[in-house]
Amino acid sequence: MTATRIDRAAAVRASMRKLVASRGLHGASMAAIAADAGVATGTAYVHYPSKDELLLAAYLELKAQLGEAAVGGINTSMPPRQRCVAMWMAIHRFIVAEPERARFLVQVDSSPMARSAHERAIADGNDPIIAKALTPDLAALLVPLPLEVIYDLSIGPAVRLVAGGEQLSSKQLRLVADGSWRAITMPG
């Protein structure tokens, strides 16, 4: 691929996130996405054969960025609880910087595409949180639930707070992060 093609594909993904965040899945047609990206509709289809494939590509890209933000400065030798709270706070900071990210995630997570998006994210094996932060000591503490549920109980509150425009104090954010920790780990 040439740099121009990569840039156009990235522009199409960015427009997908932007329009889904502001208009919902049904309000983001391929024509509207292409127009927002500054490319012809046919060009969008060159990169993504369908709206569903474009949605998945935009979702996977954002999930990878979310994971990198979560584990970027995390010391994996910290105790699991401190590590998870630090990751939660890092994720919150990342999405607060661009609330459109949170609104996009809420739209996808509440759509019929949610299951396939989550499955694709896990199947790709490139999830930085799973690869870098889900160490054996942490994995042993998690409740035995599907990863999609763990995501909803842990990262979901951060995403929904930002998507809804909720602004909490640092103390309140730590309480939510700690509550998320308790929701995903075995009692004891």
Image: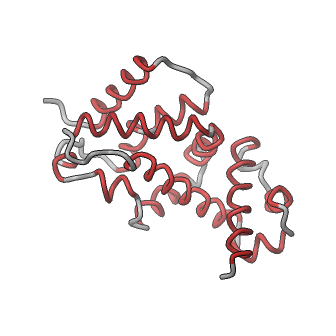
Label tally:
0
Left/right of residue 12 with respect to residue 158 in the rendered view:
right
Rendered location of residue 165, percent (x, y) = 62, 26
Residue 174 falls left or right of residue 142: right
Quadrant where the N terminus lies? Answer: bottom right
Vertical side of 99 occupied by 64: above or below: below
Q: Quadrant of residue 23?
A: top right
Report which quarter residue 31 is drawn in: bottom right
Residue at 22 percent of width and 49 percent of height: 139
Q: Residue at x 35, y 31 (%)?
A: 180
| 8 over 61 or under it: above or below | below
**Residue situated furthest left in the rendering:** 188
Q: What color scheme is it? A: secondary structure
In this picture, residue 166 sits left or right of residue 50: left
Q: Position of residue 39 (x, y in %)?
A: 84, 67
Q: Residue at x 20, y 46 (%)?
A: 77
Residue drawn at 74 percent across, 75 percent down: 4
Percent x, y of residue 91: 46, 40
Residue 3 horizontal/vertical position (percent):
69, 76
Quadrant for residue 183, please give it: top left
Q: Quadrant of the C terminus?
A: top left
When the figure is inspected, residue 180 is found, relative to residue 8, above or below; the finding is above
Residue farthest along the bottom direction in this orientation: 1
